[in-house]
Image: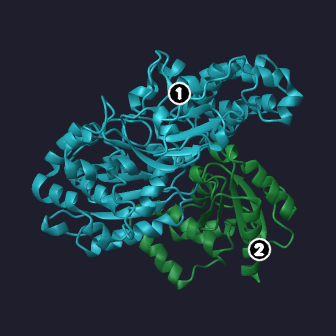
Chain colours: A green, B cyan
Amino acid sequence: MAVVQFSEEKLNKVKEIIARYPEGKQKSALIPVLHLAQESFGGWLSAETMDYVAELLQLKSIEVYEVATFYSMFNLKPVGKYLFEVCQTGPCMVNGSDNIIDYIKSTLGIEVGETTADGMFTLKAVECLGACGYAPMMQLGKHYREHLTPAKVDEIIAECRSKAN
Amino acid sequence: MGRKLLLENAHIEGIRYYDTYRKNGGYAAAEKALKSMGPEAVLEEVKKSGLRGRGGAGFPTGMKWSFIAKPEGVPRYLVCNADESEPGTFKDRYLMEFIPHLLIEGLLISSFTLGANACYIYIRGEYAWIPDILEQAIAEAKNNGWLGKNIQGTGFDLEIYVQRGAGAYICGEETALIESLEGKRGNPRIKPPFPAVKGLWQCPTVVNNVETLAAVVPIINYGADAYIGLGTGKSTGTKLISACGNINKPGVYEIEMNISVEEFIFSEEYCGGIKNGKRLKACIPGGSSVPVLPANLLLNTAKGEKRMMTYEGLAEGGFATGSMLGSGGFIVMDEDQCIVRNTLTFARFYHHESCGQCSPCREGTGWMEKVLKNIEYGKGKMSDIELLWDIQRKIEGNTICPLGDAAAWPVAAAIRHFRDEFEWHIKNPEEAQRRNFGLAHYADPLPVPAAV
């Protein structure tokens, strides 16, 4: 029996997602439901969570694992409360994304892929996020933060800290 | 000032919402298509317009539509490719974020033409705020009788659904996108069968890019002849270009396809010239997968003519002296940019994004990244240049999908046009590590083009 469990509201959302596809094609709901699971269960997908999703969609667990491990937006280990995903691809690099990554590393005292000791911030360097005209940039939650400078990074960190308190 | 078709109303406050969109001529094309034209006439108009797929490949849209199989009792699907993951490309985001009803109207007309009663917008997962905008527009369209059952009393039914991906560039390839939409890894399928015969859930399916589907609206509104009049040769109509890099005015521009590259980069109407008064060094004109061009070949073809911002113009001379319009992702580099470093970031991108199905792509992209990294960080050997050339040749054309080509071409073009820069890195490892590489080594620096 799985310990993870969607709320009633989220279960209704799952039903709504499945209804988008023809009967018997509920596997198509897998990626949207994994997004929902990641949002609901601490920002990452544990094996237990993936098993729960498999059970909900009547799939084998391996079908869920192979999808979750393919897509870069699914986190397979715990991440901080705030995930800084900084784009490092060509157009962002041309506009100084390397300096922004270095600045975040030194400000937070972590390397790329690490989480701060207080569990507040994780830093990831990611590939193109489609914001090339507004570079350098990062994704924070559902939104993009663009035209980054060290001062803007400071503001974002302060904003996250104040929200968390 | 160029004529705008897709962005003509983009400046109007509230154009994101149905009432404003409708007041400004929205859904007139859908009304015309559904009530007075019919599917055959719409298809003929789209074919006549010469519209080519705006996602990168540039395949004629009307022809693609005409391939759809029509077996009795089998549903057909339209899938809108909103995956937009090609580095340098961010134009579809603009359309979806600011003028969502233009896309909804285009989907309605296109689905009607194809006989599809369900349409899926597959959007890259990172654009996490845009599905809410699209879903609101879909709800508004439905409330006003443009979606759902018996649309505007015509007997046509259509539902549009939005599906988020989860971070995989390969899902921009149509068969990988279909696999992902079916809840699987985004592994491209071997073609044939083509999606038009066996696509989503093995049913006939057309996959078109956001900009392509939005362009159907002005084609129906103004007619194919007017659309053709805005372009030249095989490049008809207008094209959205997402311009970025070292320019004064990065952003999304709609161009008539009859202007020169020089005008696009240096005129105030578009990119406004190179930032900080620097000189133009190079440009990738159609998204990261297309060949980079040095300034002299970017502004003028090998024949000495002005290079045009058209499918044919950018390809002029083939890959030896030309490039591609691709997705319209226009990445401009100034004299301070290092081509080796730039090529390395793209090699890293393609290595990261390779789905891993085909050995040449899975292994080759990683190999190219490692060799480029060695050169960039002062550990390269002269033989590495030939090695890189050899690897890219062994990837190109030897994979199920075009990702292999997309990874190979930037490396080939960088070596072809900037071999001396690779050599300089190998001969001067310490200095290469210390500073970005500019134009200083050129005996005859490239001239700065006159502002237009």
- Residue B217: image location, x then y, percent: 27, 53
Pointer 2 indicates a residue of which chain? A
Q: Nearer the viewer, residue B155 or B315?
A: B315
Amino acid marked by disc 2: Ala
For marks 2 and 1, give the one nearer the viewer: 1
Image disc number at residue B298: 1
Please report the residue visible at 47 percent of the width from the left and 43 percent of the height from the top: B173
- Residue B301: image location, x then y, percent: 48, 20
Q: Secondary structure at mark 2?
A: helix
Give the crowd class for mark 1: few <14, some 14-19, many >=20 residues within 10 Å.
many
Image disc number at residue A46: none
Pointer 1 indicates a residue of which chain? B
Q: Secondary structure at mark 1?
A: helix
Q: Nearer the viewer, residue B127 or B352?
A: B127
- Residue B114: image location, x then y, percent: 24, 50
Is residue B336 found left or right of B124 in the rendered image? Answer: right
Instruction: For the residues labelled 2 and 1, say whether their Cβ atoms are less than 8 Å apart.
Output: no
Read off the residue under disc 2: A158
User: Quarter-wise, where is residue A20 in the image?
Assistant: bottom left
Q: Nearer the viewer, residue A135 or B181?
A: A135
Is residue B75 found left or right of B423 in the rendered image? Answer: left
